[in-house]
Amino acid sequence: MRGEENDFFRLFDFSAKEDPVPTMLTQDHVNVVPGFMGQTTSFNKGLIKKSTLILAETEGTNEAKYIHGNYGQGTFTFYGGHDPEDYQHRVGDPPTDLELHKNSPGYRLILNNILFPAAEKKERKT
């Protein structure tokens, strides 16, 4: 256990030209995001399939915090933790007031996942 004051994870950089989906999913105003806990706080990198892309990890550990991959004709994205602005949000705790966290890097990653399916692919002239 690192504790709230020492719990951070780093988003990986991707090329928008080469990797547009991971670039969209990791778009944020910071590269280092405060960690937070949940039923699944992180994923053991040793158990993640090679076809699954790790988007963020906790440095110096074997933990992936944010992963993305393809499944059948669709995709999946998992983000470890529960509430980015409440380190140990528990069942029955009052909901977090989102108005107090308008620039939350953790909520930005959640928003990226909501907006990602709506992104249209532009046809390229070749």
Image (tube, rainbow, N blue to C red):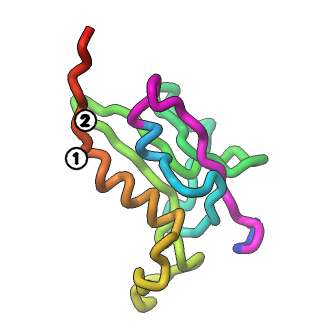
Q: Which residue is mark 2?
A: 74
Pinpoint residue 82: horizontal percent, then vertical percent: 47, 69
Specify whether 77 is left or right of 120: right
Q: In screen coordinates, is 68 left or right of 57?
A: left
Mark 2 or mark 1, earlier in chain: 2
Please name the amino acid that badge 2 sits on. Answer: Gly
Amino acid type, residue under disc 1 in the picture = Ala
Q: CA distance from mark 2 to mark 1?
A: 14 Å
Magenta region: which residues? 5-21
Name the residue at 60% across, 47% down. Answer: 11
Residue depicted at 49% across the width and 78% down the height: 101
Q: Secondary structure at mark 1?
A: helix
Of the 4 image quadrants, the one containing the N terminus is bottom right
**10 Å neighbourhood of mark 2: few (<14), some, or many (≥20)?**
few
Residue behind mark 1: 118
Position of residue 94 relative to residue 61, above or below, is below
